[in-house]
Image (cartoon, rainbow, N blue to C red):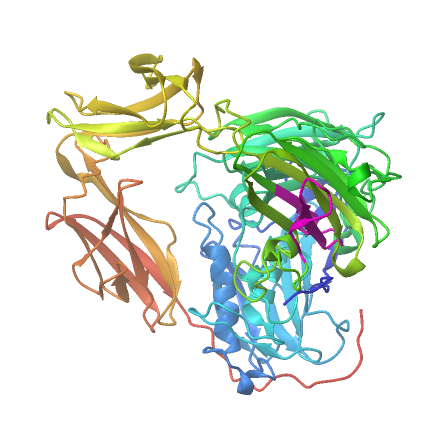
Amino acid sequence: MTRLLRPVIVVIAVCAMLTAAAVSVNAYMSIRVPTGSPGQALPVRWDLNNTAARPNIANRRVLYEIDDAGCADAAGFQGPINEFEAIQNSFAHWRDINESEIDFEFAGSTTNAVTSASDNRNVLHWVGSNISTGVFAVTVTTFDTTSGQITDTDMELNDRDFTWDTLGPTATSGWIGRAMIENVVTHEIGHVLGLDHPNNAQSTMFYASGPGLISQTTLEADDRAPIIADYTNAGVTDPDLGKVQGSVNDGSNPQFGVYVTLVDVSTGENVVGHASEGAAGPFTLGDFEIDNVPPGNYLAFACPVATSTLGSFYNSAYTNFYPVVDGVSVGNIGTPTYVQVAPGQTVTGVSLTLPSASQNPFEPDNGSGSASAIANGEVAVSSISPSTDEDWYSFTTTQANQQVTIRVLSDAFGFDLNPTLTLYDTNGSTELASPDFNSPVYLSSANDIDEAAFDFSGVNYDAEIVRTMVTPGTYFFKVASRVGATIGPYLATLEISDIDVSPDSVASSIESSVPGIAANSGGNFTITVTPKNVFGRDLNAPNTFDVQLLDVTGSPAVLQTITSASTPFTFTVNAQATAQVVKYGATIDGTPIAAEISISHYGTLSTTNSRITLLEDTLNANGYDRIPVMIELRDGANNPLPDGTIPVTVSTSAGTLDNGSTTGASNVAATFDSATGYWFIELVAPANTGTATLTAFANSTQIDSKQVSILPRATGTGGGPTIGTGGED
């Protein structure tokens, strides 16, 4: 299915008294309390410690109720579960962010579902009237502006304009034409937690969706990042996540509310972003900070926020500018300044200057004769306007069988343009790849990167062509609007293989054949270093490099060197004589790579130091909810002991255990993960509330025990609300 425009999913309503408060530098698109000049604000969040003042918080969990009447469409659901469980499963998606402590508990169905901003009850219910026409749901969040603490949140689901259905725990596609409860409610829970809408069409918190879609059921990096930052789980962290800091200005002054997002140069994915606000101490307008960024090479792309889809805090956001990539001035095609995020590192000084909005670069370029030249690694930001506009580009390959990757990104940032790509031969007229379904060289990705709308990945309206150009020459591609129906800006990127043969410090990798080895065993293992370019492509023969393997546990020390060779660069490493963890790194042609690996040279198993780690500590008593359980074996010096030959089993007093092939409650074998050196198994919920006691054994000896709370299953009578007529904002 293909759609040209996205319908709006939600209108967010916020009730609050506005009073002065302190400044926060917290990042991400959030509901915020203004505290002074534009950019000065508090993020709106739950205080899970404030249980005395908040009856809708207990045991550090946010409590919610569901209207006992449920949904009017329940009798006709094609999905396997009822509406109450579908809502509960939506909350579980946010609970399952392991690095966050946020959790929820169903506090019962209620026949008193009249929502109030001040009753300290979090109520979800379907309504048959007094909701805007065509809007799936509305979430009303009440908060205290002296602290930013959320005090009450209520959700209304539109039972008048939509036919609803459920997805269930195992389905992989939505029901066409039906509003999927998990899709809508998962999005709305983001507002319950204080989040607003990002400029990221692939995120759960993007403002638009449609009937039958389920892509907003699953959380992306842009959704997880603020939850990890603001509801941090101190016991489970990801040391690889980094941070990007910078500022935006219009050439004269810093500006508030400019969305800066990071685009992965390897995949073209819009990964994570935030609007410029300010930094404290003293307050500096125009600064931004993006936390919890996965390692990688990125483009920093600045674009206007859609103020009509955001809370009132962003009403004064600066939007009168043309989108721009860091390092490439408007109206030019060039190589960007890459934002290189090494594991766990902070990148500073990303500064973007915003051009005026009155731009339409590269015109006229409506044919091969006026095409704009673009080279490997270069980017262009332009617009299709009017909808019949065409933008032509040329590129040159110099070797036989070079692979080209052309991407045009617009939908990724929430722009209206649905772009298409057409690739032409060296004569500028013979089509090699076309977005036209009737063309003999039709390529679906030239039309939409992902046309499968109703699966978890969802539709992606952007365009991409990946093709091997057999013969060297100058070729052309055209950017246009699908069926000439949409307009808007876009970002075009080009990658040509075998041109960039320089090893990149962030993209290059180091891997071990094992996570650990027995100390003083006389054994050995291998470490492989792979040079990659900035796009993350392996630099294979005929490229040659000098590669050193380093011990970087303390001051770097060279262990081995391979000179003037091609991939693979594989080093054989002997076990240490004494138990210890050794950190290994590498240099390629004298430059250290960012990635490192830690290998445990371990001693004898210690049942005292070994342990269970619960990535989540609650389940819902529905018979299918599940959480991962991790078992870490340790030696007497508390070094990890990743010996996959040791039998590790787990028993539970409630529910069942699932290792992927075997289920049961007693002595079920956990599965060893050679990548991490840990053992994993899943605990599946029982149908009754209570406590599940997990006990882990290694070599049949008990090593640890942990408890998981089994929370009530969401239930209700059903039947649905009274359906009225008309809409109301």
Residue at x-position 62% and y-position 48%: 464
Task: Look at 58% across and 57% down and name the residue there.
Answer: 450
Horizontal placement of 479 versus 557: left or right? right
Residue 299, compared with residue 428, is above or below; it is above
> Can the viewer see residue 371 in this picture?
yes
Q: Is residue 377 above or below residue 470?
A: above
Q: Which of the two residues, 210 or 365, is positioned nearer the viewer here? A: 365
In the image, residue 598 sits, relative to residue 110, either above or below, namely above
Q: Nearer the viewer, residue 373 or 552?
A: 373
**Which of these two is toward me, 304 or 446?**
446
Going 57% across and 55% down the picture, which residue do you hit? 53
Give the magenta part as a residue range: 406-435
For this orientation, the residue located farthest to the right is: 358
Q: Is residue 72 magenta?
A: no
- Which image quarter is the C terminus in? bottom right
Instruction: Please state if 229 lies on the left or on the right of 375 as rendered.
Output: left
Residue 287 location, x and y as percent?
71, 30
Quarter-of-image position of residue 494 = top right
Q: Is residue 418 magenta?
A: yes
